[in-house]
Image (spheres, grey):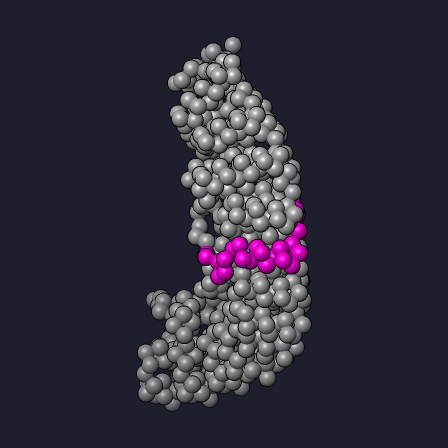
């Protein structure tokens, strides 16, 4: 209730008073709680509907205070039950937010419209559904509230608002009254939202609608019905006006059902929740969330049970292809995911980025550091992965778009497109998961579209100091040995020309360097040139593993870090192999003079 009152105060701006405003004695008296003054003013035929500077009337204040006796007094005196403040908020909207059934009944009898439209097309039933007060909802429904009304920003319905907040009883009531269980929110464009100050800014449109409602005019359209894309993300995952959230991103976390306080619908489902770095901006595949997806994103098992019992499709997907199981997995709601699997969820259903539950769970188990917190799974990652595998998860499925956990640092030298869960596990040296996947038929030789192998990522390709997750150097060494024993070629080159030894040298994994060389890795193999280095012709200069160990090769925006111990080992091995070893202490400038810039 405290949160509701806080939202109401913010929405109404009830305390603002400006000089020169029309008299609002009745509203002022109700605001002060002076019942005697109100009765006296009514007896004197004062205007009971006269607004304060912000448009708030006496009836607004009585509803805000949940004062049923005062509401009845004002209604009998002829107070305008449809009056809107400057933000478009009416007494009925406030009563619905508060979930006050008795006051809602009194207002409707006093002339309030149960289907009135707030800015963005929100209805009283949506607000009551978000609050979850079943009695308040019943009053609205009994008076003809549209159970399947859609707001204009994201096209969400009262059922979605209830599901977003995890109100199982409210969900059941709405379903019993005819709510469409298969309804989906609007399709919206992914990508950045409109820049502030432009005509498509939704806040300008809301203000215009609020002003129109307050003036009793027809509500202007919202930019031709085009929804504005919000922010995306992964872990935590923002709720309907003050709801649950951790990312945003992210994860996918919960977001406002109408999107006004959350983030992009498709990402919110994860992010619920932004697209991976491989995604194209402004693709019309966001949104189209179902009530079940909202309930899963809220991690509310009771709501999920009600929806499934009523016939919700456990495999119905969003515009980007997020299934309820993918949403549960993305958000680490593994117990809920297990329940969905037990009720027919397809463990191989991937979204448009070809992210499968198995890949996401693998990624979750090996999550790298980032700019946002990530929640702890409600059951062990490995146990959930075993459950997926036991139910037939395709262990060799290849993903397409880089997942949102990849930071810009990683993406600049590792594109996940084509990766399998096994390759992802190899990147973090997750030896336990690698062995589990192999036992279920994983092919360790499947590489990415750009020919990055599991051995390369295990050795250090894609490694970002302080970012990439690694179980331990010892487990990484064991993973490299396992991959070599499985027949992976230490001299296989990716599209950049890099091999596993380049990665190990860049990372400073001295023990890995030795093992690779012991298995035939070529010490003088060169990449195809690194355009991230600056310095004239050095932009196309090719580099040996020892150059990476010396910190001369800058990968992306991360700093190149010298690893002297690794560099000394490489020089020792090169000398022993009869290869020319470069001197210690080189700089980019010296290389330009002696090797590249003739």
Q: Position of residue 496 (x, y in %)?
A: 59, 28
Locate residue 294: give its quadrant: bottom right
Left/right placement of residue 572 relative to residue 309 reads: left
Please, is residue 270 above or below residue 304 in the view? above
Name the quarter where the N terminus is drawn: bottom left
Q: Up-down: is 431 above or below 290?
A: above
Q: Is residue 251 left or right of residue 563?
A: right
List x then y, in percent, for residue 380. 50, 57
Residue 271 among magenta residues: no
Question: Which residue: 62% across, 40% down?
Answer: 444
Occupied quadrant, residue 566: top left
Q: Nearer the viewer, residue 301 or 285?
A: 301
Image point 57% across, 62% down: which residue?
337
- Which secondary structure type mostly characterizes the magenta part of the structure? loop
Using the image, determine if residue 363 lies above or below residue 13.
above
Judged from this view, the residue extending furthest toward the top is 598
Q: Between 143 and 197, which is closer to the camera in this rendering?
A: 143
Query: Residue 285 vs residue 194: left or right?
Result: right
Instruction: Provide residue 172's location: percent of width, then percent of height.
Output: 59, 77
The spot of residue 376 in percent (x, y) is: 46, 57
Q: Is residue 3 visible?
A: yes
How many labels were placed on the picture? 0
Q: Residue at x 64, y 38 (%)?
A: 445
Q: Is residue 399 magenta?
A: yes
Can residue 270 be seen from the camera position used here?
Answer: no
**Is 126 or 588 nearer to us in this picture?**
588
Q: Residue at x 32, y 83 (%)?
A: 34
Q: 454 or 56: which is nearer to us? A: 454
Q: Which residues are magenta?
A: 375-404
Q: Relative to 194, say whether 38 is above or below.
A: below
């Amino acid at each position: 209730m405290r949160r509701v009152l806080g939202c109401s105060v913010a929405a109404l701006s009830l305390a603002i008073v400006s000089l020169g405003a029309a008299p609002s004695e009745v509203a002022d008296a109700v605001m002060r709680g002076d019942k005697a003054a109100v009765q006296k003013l009514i007896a004197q035929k004062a205007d009971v509907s006269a607004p304060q500077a912000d448009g708030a009337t006496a009836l607004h204040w009585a509803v805000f205070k949940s004062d049923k006796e005062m509401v009845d007094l004002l209604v009998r005196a002829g107070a305008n039950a449809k009056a809107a403040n400057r933000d478009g908020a009416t007494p009925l909207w406030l009563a619905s937010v508060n979930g006050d059934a008795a006051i809602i009944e009194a207002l409707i009898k006093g002339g309030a419209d149960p289907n009135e439209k707030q800015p963005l097309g929100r209805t009283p039933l949506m607000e009551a559904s978000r609050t979850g007060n079943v009695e308040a909802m019943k009053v609205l429904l009994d008076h003809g509230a549209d159970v399947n009304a859609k707001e204009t920003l994201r096209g969400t319905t009262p059922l979605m608002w209830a599901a977003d907040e995890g109100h199982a009883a409210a969900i059941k009531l709405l379903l019993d009254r005819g709510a469409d269980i298969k309804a989906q929110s609007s399709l919206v464009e992914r990508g950045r939202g409109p820049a502030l100050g432009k005509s498509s800014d939704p806040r300008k449109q809301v203000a215009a609608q609020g002003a129109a409602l307050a003036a009793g005019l027809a509500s202007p359209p919202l930019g031709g019905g085009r929804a504005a894309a919000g922010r995306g993300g992964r872990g935590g995952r923002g709720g309907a006006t003050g709801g649950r959230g951790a990312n945003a991103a992210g994860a996918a976390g919960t977001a406002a059902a109408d999107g006004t306080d959350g983030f992009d619908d498709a990402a919110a489902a994860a992010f619920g929740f932004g697209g991976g770095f491989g995604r194209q901006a402004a693709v019309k595949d966001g949104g189209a969330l179902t009530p079940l997806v909202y309930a899963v994103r809220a991690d509310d098992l009771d709501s999920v049970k009600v929806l499934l019992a009523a016939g919700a499709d456990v495999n119905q997907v969003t515009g980007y292809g997020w299934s309820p199981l993918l949403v549960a997995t993305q958000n680490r709601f593994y117990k809920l995911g297990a329940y969905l699997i037990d009720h027919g969820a397809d463990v191989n259903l991937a979204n448009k980025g070809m992210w499968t539950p198995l890949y996401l769970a693998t990624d979750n188990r090996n999550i790298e550091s980032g700019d946002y917190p990530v929640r702890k799974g409600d059951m062990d990652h490995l146990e959930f992965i075993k459950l997926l595998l036991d139910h037939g998860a395709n262990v060799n499925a290849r993903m397409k778009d880089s997942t949102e956990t990849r930071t810009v640092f990683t993406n600049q030298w590792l594109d996940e497109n084509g990766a399998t869960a096994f390759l992802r596990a190899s990147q973090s040296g997750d030896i336990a998961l690698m062995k589990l996947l192999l036992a279920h038929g994983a092919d360790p030789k499947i590489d990415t579209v750009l020919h990055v192998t599991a051995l390369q990522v295990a050795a250090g390709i894609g490694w970002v100091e302080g970012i990439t997750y690694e179980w331990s150097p010892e487990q990484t060494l064991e993973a490299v040995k396992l991959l070599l024993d499985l027949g992976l070629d230490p001299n296989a080159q990716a599209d950049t020309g890099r091999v596993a030894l380049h990665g190990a040298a860049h990372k400073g994994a001295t023990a890995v360097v030795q093992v690779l060389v012991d298995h035939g890795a070529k010490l003088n193999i060169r990449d195809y040139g690194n355009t991230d280095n600056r310095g004239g012709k050095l932009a196309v200069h090719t580099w040996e593993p020892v150059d990476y160990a010396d910190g001369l090769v800058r990968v992306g925006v991360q700093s190149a870090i010298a690893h002297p111990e690794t560099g000394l080992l490489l020089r020792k091995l090169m000398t022993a192999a009869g290869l020319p070893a470069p001197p210690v202490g080189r700089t980019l400038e010296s290389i330009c003079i002696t090797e590249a810039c003739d």
